[in-house]
Image (tube, rainbow, N blue to C red):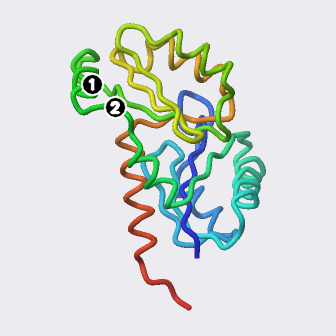
Amino acid sequence: MPVFAAFLRGVNVGRTGRIKMADLKQALAEQPFTQITTYLQSGNLVFCCDEPADAVIKKLETVLQMQFALLSPVILRTAAEMRALVAAHPFTIAAIRQAALQSGNAESYYVQLCATPPPKRILDTLQTLQTGGAQLHLAGSDLYLLLPGGIRNSKLAQKAAQLVPLATVRNFKTICAVTALTTKLEATPRPL
């Protein structure tokens, strides 16, 4: 059975979109999803499902809307896509360390997971905001962001969020952790 990672946008950030992951997990267990795991409280899910990706996204978005009154785009990746996402990271260890030092050891390495690849005109606009050591790299549908001042003060990250609305951002540590969960679930024997 295929293993998926789902990333929900705007869940448990600020005052809106509040969902307990245990409640979400229970609601999804009533759907065709099995072996559901959540990671942190920010809308990161790993599960098995025999349905095609488009159907999985639609079911997740329906559950969020109907049971939690939340209109949240869902970005879905297979376990293989998650491994490729981690393997493709474009920045050198030295650049990542330097960015971390510049941001006072706060998170500085992120991935903006996009529903579809951003068009060239958007990339051209974003590339003009690569200042102060900020870097951007597109691989597949995803934007890798190295943000030496952190994400909150980054004009690059703010513009990327504005121009690519069907997307959500996670730090690279979360991407790695969710990838490990998908790999573990793939290796787990399932009942026949």
Q: Is 73 situated left or right of 84 in this image?
A: right
Assign a secondary structure to mark 2. Answer: loop
Residue corresponding to mark 1? 95
Number of callouts in the render?
Answer: 2
Q: Is 17 situated left or right of 39 in this image?
A: right
> Residues at badges 2 and 1 in contact (C-beta under 8 Å)?
yes
Residue 59 location in percent, x, y? 74, 58
Residue at image location 54% in from the left, 67% down from the top: 3
The quarter of the image holding the C terminus is: bottom right
What type is the residue that disc 2 sits on? Phe
The quarter of the image holding the N terminus is: bottom right
Assign a secondary structure to mark 1. Answer: helix
For residue 171, above or below residue 57:
above
Q: Nearer the viewer, residue 12 or 189?
A: 189
Residue at image location 50% in from the left, 61% down from the top: 79
Q: Nearer the viewer, residue 67 or 47?
A: 47
Residue 52 location in percent, x, y? 71, 65
Residue 14 location in percent, x, y? 54, 27
Residue at image location 28% in from the left, 28% down from the top: 96
Quarter of image, res 171: top left
What type is the residue that disc 1 sits on? Ala
Quarter of image, res 158: top right
Q: How far is mark 2 from mark 1, CA to CA?
A: 6 Å
The crowding category of the residue bearing disc 1, from other C-alpha atoms within 10 Å (few below 14, some 14 to 19, many at least 20), is some
Residue corresponding to mark 2? 91
The crowding category of the residue bearing disc 2, from other C-alpha atoms within 10 Å (few below 14, some 14 to 19, many at least 20), is some
Residue 131 location in percent, x, y? 42, 8
Residue at image location 50% in from the left, 10% down from the top: 129
